[in-house]
Image (tube, rainbow, N blue to C red):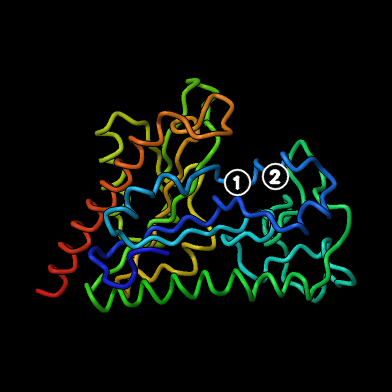
């Protein structure tokens, strides 16, 4: 975590899925080759916020791998099939992501099948929640509230990466997807600003399709309290090598782009906050 002590802008960057820290327990329990887990990563998305760190923007980055625990899922979104002795009736009805194998602890990957040789104990999963999930979200909540108190407004920009998207009709897909849960997690001006800025740089950008934002936006957005949350999905081919495994030449310009987006969001937020105060 960086830049949260003496905050200069009312924008917090979070990067929840770029972690490359894999505990030994991950590989001991794997049914698939370890390289398969790269598909769960927002590969090197943490590099995209390095310029923001350098200039002092508030940034929080998760280092533990998503295969261990997914910070963009509710802690109740536990896949019953993965828990020893679990009873379906004791858990909420599974959502779409969980049914697809991508719950709090990912269970399976399309094209790979089940990831694990065995089930986990509920104590094991609860330990991961207590050590990683709750502290991450508590930190975001605290920073956003401190930000709102200082500036009158706070904006969370949740940074992810996505595989290249291809439209069957045109062959081309968006290079960035902005998500605000169809206007539920932020005032419309923030998504509109991001769309305008990205398109002004010559990128193809889409709003809420196919990624509208998930748990992080649902949990932390409070637009009526002037705490807004927006998701930013970045096409990995823009900054990784052709195999989408290692950083490529696009990292440096995207670092500058995202730092510029933070500054633009900050200007918009402070202007809107001043208008609200005047009213």
**Residue beneath the point at 76% across and 48% down:** 108
- Residue occupied by mark 1: 41
Q: Residue 16: x, y in percent?
A: 52, 57
Q: Residues within 10 Å of mark 1 (few under 14, many from 20)?
A: many
Residue 70 location in percent, x, y? 62, 59
In the orientation shown, which residue stands out farthest toward the left?
278
Disc sitting over residue 65 in the figure: none
Residue 234 position (above or below residue 143): above
Numbered disc 1: secondary structure: loop
**Which residue is at a point 71% across and 58% down the rendered structure image?**
23
| Quadrant for the N terminus in the image | bottom left
Identity of the residue drawn at 43% across and 33% down: 175
Which one is in front, 279 or 80?
80
Residue 164 is situated, as x and y percent measured from the top left of the image, at 52, 31
Q: Give the image location of residue 83, x and y in percent.
A: 83, 67
Residue in front for this viewpoint, 240 or 115: 240
Left/right of residue 37 with respect to residue 268 in the rendered view: right
Circles 1 and 2: CB distance less than 8 Å? yes
Number of other residues with Cα within 10 Å of mark 2, as a class: few under 14, some 14 to 19, many 20 or more: many
Q: Secondary structure at mark 2?
A: helix
Quarter of the rendering occupied by the C terminus: bottom left
Of residues 173 and 266, the one drawn nearer to the viewer in this rendering: 266
Q: Residue at 38% of width from left, 63% of height from top?
A: 2
The Cα atoms of the two marked residues, 1 and 2, are separated by 7 Å
Q: Position of 228 compared to 181: left or right?
A: left
Q: Quadrant of residue 91?
A: bottom right
* Left/right of residue 273 with respect to residue 223 in the rendered view: left
Which residue has dot 2 on it?
Answer: 37
Q: What is the count of numbered marks?
A: 2
């Amino acid at each position: 975590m960086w830049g949260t002590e003496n905050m200069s802008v009312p924008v917090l960057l979070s990067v929840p899925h770029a972690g490359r820290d894999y505990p030994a327990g991950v590989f001991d329990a794997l049914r698939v080759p370890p390289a398969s887990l790269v598909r769960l990563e927002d590969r090197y998305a943490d590099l995209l916020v390095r310029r923001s760190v350098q200039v002092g923007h508030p940034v929080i980055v998760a280092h533990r791998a998503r295969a261990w625990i997914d910070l963009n899922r509710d802690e109740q979104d536990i896949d019953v099939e993965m828990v020893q002795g679990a009873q379906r009736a004791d858990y909420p009805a599974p959502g779409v992501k969980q049914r697809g194998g991508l719950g709090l602890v990912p269970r399976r990957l399309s094209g790979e099948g089940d990831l694990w040789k065995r089930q986990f104990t509920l104590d094991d999963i609860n330990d991961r929640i207590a050590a990683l999930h709750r502290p991450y979200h508590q930190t975001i909540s605290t920073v956003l509230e401190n930000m709102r108190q200082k500036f009158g407004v706070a904006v969370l920009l949740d940074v992810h990466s996505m595989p290249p998207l291809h439209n069957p009709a045109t062959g081309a897909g968006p290079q960035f997807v902005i998500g605000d849960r169809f206007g539920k997690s932020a005032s419309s001006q923030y998504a509109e600003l991001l769309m305008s800025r990205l398109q002004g740089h010559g990128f193809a950008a889409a709003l809420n399709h196919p990624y509208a934002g998930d748990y992080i936006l649902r949990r932390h957005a409070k637009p009526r309290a002037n705490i807004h949350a927006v998701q930013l999905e970045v096409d990995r081919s823009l900054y990784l090598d052709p195999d989408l495994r290692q950083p490529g030449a696009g990292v440096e310009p995207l670092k500058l782009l995202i730092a510029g987006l933070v500054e633009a969001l900050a200007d918009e937020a402070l202007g809107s906050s001043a208008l609200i105060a005047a009213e």
